[in-house]
Amino acid sequence: MADNYLEYHHEEYEQRKARWIAKKKHMKSPTRPLRIHRPDDEAL
């Protein structure tokens, strides 16, 4: 194995992480669920 095996894989990890964060920033965040209008209980 090369002496810089861990360093190489750490750099690869950092690059993957940076791509993931960039992709995550472009994703639309989920909005709050819409409130469903429910009629008052007519049985009361």
Image (cartoon, rainbow, N blue to C red):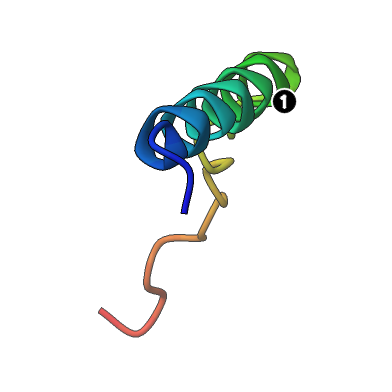
Q: Quadrant of residue 20?
A: top right
Left or right: 39 as drawn, with respect to 27? left
> Which residue type does callout 1 highlight?
Met
Percent position (x, y) of residue 37? 56, 50
Using the image as rendered, state which of residue 33 and residue 21 is in the foreground.
21
Percent position (x, y) of residue 2? 48, 43
Percent position (x, y) of residue 9? 49, 39
Percent position (x, y) of residue 28? 71, 24
Which residue sits at x=38%, y=36%? 3
Using the image as rendered, state which of residue 19 and residue 10 is in the foreground.
10
Which residue sits at x=37%, y=39%? 6
Which residue sits at x=51%, y=60%? 39
Assess disc 1: are there few (<14), some (14-19) or many (≥20) residues with their C-alpha within 10 Å of its C-alpha: few
User: At numbered mark 1, what does the secondary structure look like: helix, strand or loop?
Assistant: loop
Left or right: 15 as drawn, with respect to 3? right
* Residue annotated with mark 1: 27
Q: In this view, does 33 lie above or below 21?
A: below
Total labels drawn: 1
